[in-house]
Structures are given as structure tokens and as C-alpha cells.
Image (cartoon, rainbow, N blue to C red):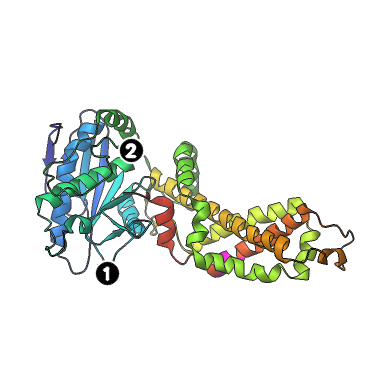
Amino acid sequence: MEDSPGPASETTAGEGTGGPAVVGEGGDGPTVDVGVLPATASRVDPERLVAFTGQLAADAVDELAAATGATWRFYDEEPEPLSDPEPRRPSEFLDEAALRMVEGPYDLVVVVTDAPLLARDRSRVAGLASPLSRVAVVSTRRLRTSGRDRPRRPLDDPAVRYNGATVLLHQVGHLLGAGHDADGGVMAPYEFDPGRRSVPSFDADLRRRLERVATTVPEAEVASRSVADLVRFHLASAARNPRKLLGALATSRAPLLPLFLPKLSTAAVAPTLILVFSAETWDVGLNLGNGTAALFAVVSVLAAAAYLLFSLNLNVPRERRGVVTEHVALLNVAILGILVAGVAGLFALVAGIMLVIEYVVFPPNLMTNWPSLEDPVVTTVDIVRIAGFIATVGVLTGALAGGLEDRTLLRHLALFRRRP
């Protein structure tokens, strides 16, 4: 190790799926169990990637143990074959990673893939992390890329090995809540270093923080014997971790999700363009109470979010298992919260469009001659209420007719970090 000898690590041969591969002793601290999942493209020999993932764990485990004071145990998982070597978002690995997490059960899961990994801006990166779901993805494609007219680096190249271990440490640091550190070390913004021959260390200040965080990583489990037990456990997990949940919602930019889901937005906006010029719509909106309109909007937003959640099976893991860890339950609550915020953002988008049409396009003197209007004065409150009523109908239409054309995109935007 660089700058620090670290505690001794032990490497043993795993016996089948989940066998212990690498153990790093960290003293009297807690024990953190990590599942390592190779995800191999169809044209690549999976054994080479499996051996490489084991090497990454062996190179990283001592520094993790030294930085956190915890005992880290990395377990080999059976490789997950990919249908093709095309670029992938990290959220495409989330279902399988969450399933392995509850089957283990594990505290963290690291996916190592030979497919290109895409960030939010579609650039190819070496790794990305989702602190809420406790899943990190490392791609060997960026590590093996060399200059023009040069062959790709092999997996056993020392530069690939130690840069890969650095990426793994960097992403696990994000899973533990660490941000980027401009002063260098593991958490410095990652750049490939062809001359790297050792693993960098966490700095002293970050080590003290990680020691505190590591004690909260191992979590309790619950037997999912009934739906009622699962619901209670999910609610209790959210109540015990309000800061984590609110932090995930705050950083997810969920209200902006409709801008990235054009099919959903189109299905919501298209019918409202007809409704806003419909006499029946204005009759209902003008005679609707403010409280009734607000309640209708709130119930519709919640119903649309719940429909999207269950109709598309966005819960994790998608297959029901006998054990659910607390952070998996918290992840499901966060997904529902992100959907609610996203649908609320869709409501605001449609309502804003309706307000523009009502104020700019709709003839201003038309309402004074409206046959069913007792009072010829239409106030600003009336116009806002009508826009909200039309937007409520649009939200329901969008959820039922449009849905989410890309469930992995929603998870990618909402759960994974923007930067490596």
C-alpha cells in the first residue's frame, strides 16, 4: 500500500457462489460484507474477469480496513452474463445487484463489468456509485483503452490492475458518503495514470470520518413473510433514516424527471391542449371548490406515482426473497418518493403550460360572455384553479397512457451520482 502498510489481508479460495475471497482485518470494528459481481459481455471469457475482480478486491481490502477500522470481507458471486457488449447505464445492473444483496445478504455490492459504462451526459466513465442503493459499478473498458494505433491493455497489465483498484476504492468511498477531495488521495477526481503501481490512501481527515460511518454500515434483516410485515419494515426503515431519505430526494433532481421522459410528458400534455379550449372543462373548473381541486390534485399525483411503481415493478429486488435488508427497504421508499416528486414535477410542467395558454392564447374577453357564468368576472384564482384541474387530468393520462419508456433511465437519474 502507498503511504500506509495497513492491516494484513487474507485471501482464500471461494467455494461456490458467495464463498469468501478476500478478508481484511480491521481490528475490533464492525464487519462489512461486500458482494463482488462480475458482469461479462458474451464475447469475453468470464474467467478472466472473475480473476480480475478478485485481484481488485485483494488490492483494495487493506486500505479499506485501515481507513475504517472495520473488517472487510469480499465474496465472489457467480458471473452475470450480458447479452451484448453495448454501453450500459449503471442502473441496468441494479436489479441483479439488489437480488444478490438480499441473497447474500451483503452490506454493499460492487459490479465489475467489461462493458462500457455511461454517465448522465452519455460519456464513458470508469465507475459510478449509488450511495442510497449501496451499489457501485466499475468498468474495465475505460481502464483498458490506450492511445491511437495501440492495442488495448490486457487485464493483467499493472496499470489496469492498480487503476482498477483505485476506481473500486473511490466508488466504495462514495458509498460510504465521501465526496471528491481536491487535495489528492483516493477521493481525488479520478484520472487514469499509466504509471500507477500502487493503491493510493484515504487522507487522515477522511479516515476519521469513515471510521464513524463504517459502524452504521452493517444492518439488520427482516423475514418478508407477509405483505404487512414488509410494509411495516419499509415504514420503520424510513422513520429511522429520515436524513438519508431526504438527502437522496434532494440530490435526485426528481422534479426534473419529466424533461428526460418525453413519452410520459407528451402523453400528459397532448390531451390538455384540447381540454383547455373545452367549454365543459371551464364549467367544471369555475364551479370547483379550491379545496376539492387541491385534494383532487394531491390524490392524483400519489395515485399516478403508485401506479407507475407497481405497474412497472420498480421495487428492488424484483424477485421476492425471504430477507430484505434495511437499506434495500429504504431504497424502495426513496424510489416511491422520487416518483411522487417526478409526477409533481410533471403536474407543475403541465399546469405552467396551461397558465401560459390561458393568459396569452385564450381570448381575454371570451369569459365575460360565457353562458353558464353567473359572475362575468374571472379572477386569477379561477384561472390557476382551472390550470390545476386540467393538469391533474393530464397527470393521470400521462401515467396511464405514457408510463415510463425507460425504467433504467429513471433509476440512473435518480439514484446514481452524476460524476464518477
- Helix, strand or loop at label 2? It is loop
* Residue occupying image coordinates x 56% and y 70%: 401
Residue 93 at x, y = what percent? 32, 58
Give the amino acid at mark 1: Ser
What is the quadrant of residue 174 in the picture?
top left
* Residue occupying image coordinates x 69% and y 64%: 357
Residue 286 at x, y = what percent? 80, 60
Q: Which residues are magenta?
A: 397-401
* Residue occupying image coordinates x 23% and y 46%: 168
Instruction: Name the main secondary structure of what is drawn in magenta.
Output: helix
Mark with earlier residue (2, 1): 1
Q: Which mark is residue 83?
A: 1
What residue would you read off at disc 2?
178
Q: Is residue 365 magenta?
A: no
* Residue occupying image coordinates x 47% and y 63%: 312
Give the amino acid at mark 2: Ala
Would you say residue 222 is visible in this rendering?
A: no
> Which quarter shows the N terminus?
top left
What is the quadrant of residue 299 in the picture?
bottom right
Depth order, front residue of 342/25: 342
Depth order, front residue of 291/332: 291
In the image, is 221 to the left or to the right of 31?
Answer: right
Residue 17 at x, y = what percent? 21, 54
Q: Residues within 10 Å of mark 1 (few under 14, many from 20)?
A: few
Residue 378 at x, y = what percent? 82, 57
Q: Does residue 107 lie above or below 292 as drawn? A: above
- As measured in the structure, the alpha-carbon distance from the residue carrying label 2 to the one carrying label 1 is 34 Å
Q: Does residue 329 lie above or below 355 as drawn? A: above
In the image, is 130 to the left or to the right of 158?
Answer: right
Q: Residues within 10 Å of mark 2 (few under 14, many from 20)?
A: some
Would you say residue 214 is visible in this rendering?
A: yes
